[in-house]
Image: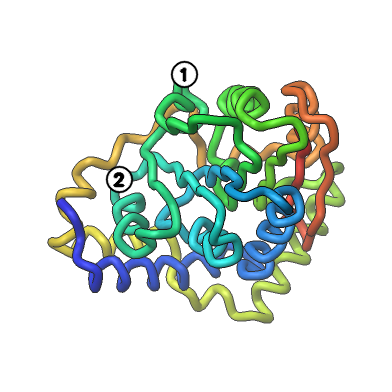
Amino acid sequence: MGLSMATAEQWVRRWEHQQQRYALDREERFTVIADVVEQVTAGQARPLVADLGCGPGSLAARLSWRLPHADIVAVDIDPLLLELGRTHHATAARFVRAAIGTDGWTEALELGGPLDAVVSTTALHCLGADALSRTYNDLATLLRPGGVLVNSDRLRPAGDRAAEIALHVGRRRGERRRLSAHEDWESWWTAAQDDPELADLLSLRPARDPSHTLHNGLALAHHADLLRQAGFEDVSPVWQFGGDYVLVAVR
């Protein structure tokens, strides 16, 4: 069921292009996340990092380039995206299949020690409020004291009017950068279904988990509350544009 390197490269490259439609300043976000992890793990010989909702390994690969001494565990539920990552970014991370936020999901990670950092980009918004709360509590038990959760995602600012303005600002910037010209999510998956080399992996894709959603719509303040309730001491954005944030929570 393994993929050829050429096929993996083709679909990962297409994924990267498609994702730029949804994440303004995507490379800058990746850089900011790496900055945070680098600072928190400075002086450690072999920091342990988990990438949640890793897809085909976009963030894990960039962290590996920046921090080649780190052990990275990349986690996702989608068998096709994981296999693309295993093939195209074989040395970047250990790719693990798990349904984040479900009972016992952390056991699949087989960590062997406390995490120094957990990172995620445009993924945790797919968890419903209850699953997200469970995930934050689980991560609080896995992270060492002083470890961090770094989440890059679209989060609703406080206040309806502020949220409306933030979304408008983001839309206008996307229009200036012609992001709507990029392939969208649905088109990527539709095209993937026509590639015979992907057929077996596509057949293994699960039905949507009821604990998952297209976007949970939670505000930044709600995320901060859930994180503090889970045991994270300091919670603050370190980067923002419109409604897009890189949020850091320190254990």
Residue 166: % across, % down: 79, 58
Quadrant position of residue 244: bottom right
Crowding near pointer 1: few (<14 within 10 Å), some, many (20+)? few
Q: Image point 71% across, 47% down: which residue? A: 155
Quadrant position of residue 236: top right
What's the mark number on residue 14? none
Drawn side of residue 206 relative to residue 178, left or right:
left
Element type at mark 2: helix
What's the mark number on residue 79? 2
Q: Is residue 86 above or below residue 203?
A: below
Residue furthest to the top in view is 103
Element type at mark 1: loop
Kind of residue at disc 1: Asp
Q: How is the image coloured?
A: rainbow
Residue 24 is at least partly visible in this image: yes
Q: Is residue 127 above or below residue 46?
A: above
Q: Earlier in the sequence, mark 2 or mark 1?
A: 2
Q: Quadrant of the C terminus?
A: top right
Q: Which residue is mark 1?
A: 103
Residue 123: % across, % down: 55, 46
Q: How many marks?
A: 2
Kind of residue at disc 2: Pro
Residue 144: % across, % down: 69, 31
Q: Image point 86% across, 49% down: which residue? A: 161
